[in-house]
Image: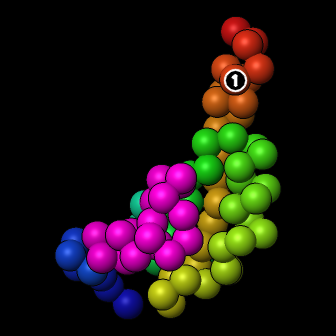
């Protein structure tokens, strides 16, 4: 399956509306095919997102990521 840029933008917009506008979305080629990558920014937000977001969305595998750096920055660590 191959997606055009227009199709990718439409899926990202739909995900932002249907799933949550709080996350950042991107579409990448992954080991299991085309993947919708959801950046939840922190570990806590990622835990919530993993409970809400299905494993497959619009025919794409989904993966929720976060940055440990963002967690340490919020905690006031350097």
x, y percent for residue 32: 59, 79
Residue 62 appears in the figure: yes
x, y percent for residue 67: 64, 38
**Residue at 61% over, 50% down:** 40
| Residue lying farthest to the top in this orientation | 78
**Residue at 77% over, 20% down:** 75
**Residue at 71% over, 53% down:** 46
Q: Is residue 10 covered in magenta?
A: yes
Which residue is disc 1 drawn over? 74
Q: Is residue 16 covered in magenta?
A: yes
Q: Is residue 12 above or below residue 21?
A: below
x, y percent for residue 45: 71, 49
Residue 29 appears in the figure: no
> Which quarter of the image is occupied by the N terminus?
bottom left
Marker count (numbered): 1
Look at the image and give the residue range highlighted in magenta: 9-25
Q: Secondary structure at mark 1?
A: helix
């Amino acid at each position: 399956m191959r997606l055009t840029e227009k199709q990718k933008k439409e899926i990202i917009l739909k995900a932002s509306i249907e799933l949550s506008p709080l996350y950042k979305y991107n579409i990448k080629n992954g080991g299991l095919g085309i993947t919708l990558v959801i950046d939840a920014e922190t570990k806590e937000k990622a835990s919530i997102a993993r409970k809400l977001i299905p494993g497959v969305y619009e025919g794409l595998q989904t993966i929720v990521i976060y940055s440990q750096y963002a967690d340490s920055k919020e905690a006031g660590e350097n």
